[in-house]
Amino acid sequence: MSTYPISWNQVANQGTGAGQAAASGRYHARAAFSGYPVSTSASFTIG
């Protein structure tokens, strides 16, 4: 297992709100590295 800290400006990068601040709610983050399977997702909540 490896840990990689990241930062996010909380701007949506896809969907109808792309380019705008992400709305309050529950989200899932997923990591993808070339040559490796996609990781399981980690959930988090915004305000």
Image (cartoon, rainbow, N blue to C red):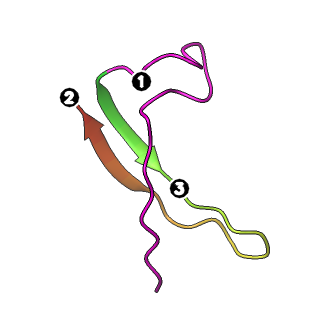
Looking at the rendered structure, the kind of residue marked 3 is Arg
Left or right, 6 with respect to 31, comes to left
Residue under the point 43% across and 76% down: 3
Q: Label 1 to label 2, Cα distance in Å?
A: 10 Å
The x, y position of residue 34, in whole percent, is 77, 69
Please give the residue where the numbered disc 2 appears in the rendered image.
47
Q: Quadrant of the C terminus?
A: top left
Dot 2 falls on a residue whose secondary structure is loop
* Span of residues in magenta: 1-23
Dot 1 falls on a residue whose secondary structure is loop
From the viewer's side, name the closer residue of 19 and 40.
Answer: 19
Based on the displayed image, in which of its 4 quarters is residue 39 positioned?
bottom right
Please give the residue where the numbered disc 3 appears in the rendered image.
30
Left or right, 45 with respect to 9, comes to left
The x, y position of residue 25, in whole percent, is 30, 28
**Pointer 3 with pointer 1, Cβ within 8 A:** no
Looking at the rendered structure, the kind of residue marked 1 is Ala
The x, y position of residue 36, in whole percent, is 71, 76
Magenta stretch: includes residue 18: yes
From the viewer's side, name the closer residue of 2 and 42.
Answer: 2
Q: Residues within 10 Å of mark 1 (few under 14, many from 20)?
A: some
Please give the residue where the numbered disc 1 appears in the rendered image.
22
Residue under the point 29% across and 23% down: 24
Reply above or below: 2 against 47. Answer: below
Q: Earlier in the sequence, mark 1 or mark 2?
A: 1
Residue lying furthest left: 47
Looking at the rendered structure, the kind of residue marked 2 is Gly
